Image (spheres, helix red, strand yellow):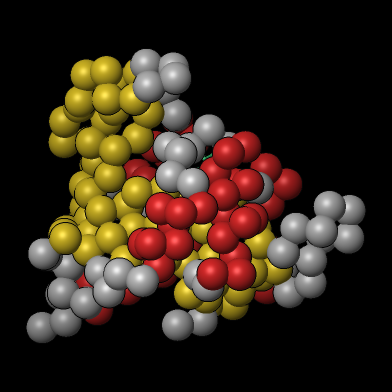
Amino acid sequence: MRVELEQAGCVVVPMSEHDLLEVVEIEETTGLSQWGWEAYRAELDKQEAVMLVARRYTPDASNGRGLAGYIAARINADELHVNNIGVWPESRRRGVGGALLWAALEAGARRGAVEAVLEVRAGNLPAQMMYERFGFRVVGERKGYYREPVEDAKIMTRRLATAA
Ligand SMILES: CC(C)(COP(=O)(O)OP(=O)(O)OC[C@H]1O[C@@H](n2cnc3c(N)ncnc32)[C@H](O)[C@@H]1OP(=O)(O)O)[C@@H](O)C(=O)NCCC(=O)NCCS
């Protein structure tokens, strides 16, 4: 799997162990649910994991960053659960998040998932806009789902195209 994003200067490819230090850095600095290195490392070995990065063609000269962003999702039976998606601030609004999301949805559909589901902070409007743009709709909420700070989650889902 390889999706070129020439305008954003990167390519979407499967995540490898070498990406994990920067993935964790993105996670820690963009307000995402904190998994940490060990959890991502363990996840990489799981067959049901869908983990992708947007790798820059050349590392950013100013900060050495080799990635633009990443997504971590997992297939549970016929459902693709999107756990975390993050893009470095300087790479946002160039289609990176959308490309990562789309690639994960396609990977999930190819592997038999018929629905994608995710939780998002009720106040995270940029992410909600992106999910809506990619066909997700709010189907419910979970009160007090998030910690630090405590916040409700919106549950969003979308159907996935089936191979048939
Ligand atoms: C949410 C996030 C991943 C989006 O990444 P991105 O690379 O900027 O997304 P894209 O450029 O592909 O945007 C796709 C679409 O989403 C919507 N969108 C994204 N960011 C938006 C914003 N700040 N305001 C309004 N709409 C936005 C737009 O419709 C956009 O399309 P457009 O630029 O053509 O209008 C990024 O803002 C991020 O990392 N945020 C912090 C981490 C986070 O909140 N993750 C989600 C946890 S559930």
Q: Is residue 160 visible?
A: no
* Residue 112 falls left or right of residue 99: left
4 shown above or below 36 = below
Q: Is residue 78 visible?
A: yes
Nearest the eye: 47 or 54: 47
Residue positioned 54% across, 44% down in the render: 27
Residue positioned 47% across, 67% down in the render: 52
Q: Quadrant of residue 30?
A: top right
* Residue 147 falls left or right of residue 119: right
Q: Position of residue 81 (x, y in %)?
A: 25, 53
Quadrant that contains the C terminus: bottom left
Nearest the eye: 7 or 111: 111
Nearest the eye: 77 or 158: 77
Q: Position of residue 39 (x, y in %)?
A: 41, 53
Q: Quadrant of residue 159?
A: bottom left
Q: Position of residue 34 (x, y in %)?
A: 46, 39
* Residue 80 falls left or right of residue 42: left
Residue positioned 67% across, 43% down in the render: 89
* Farthest residue, direction right: 62
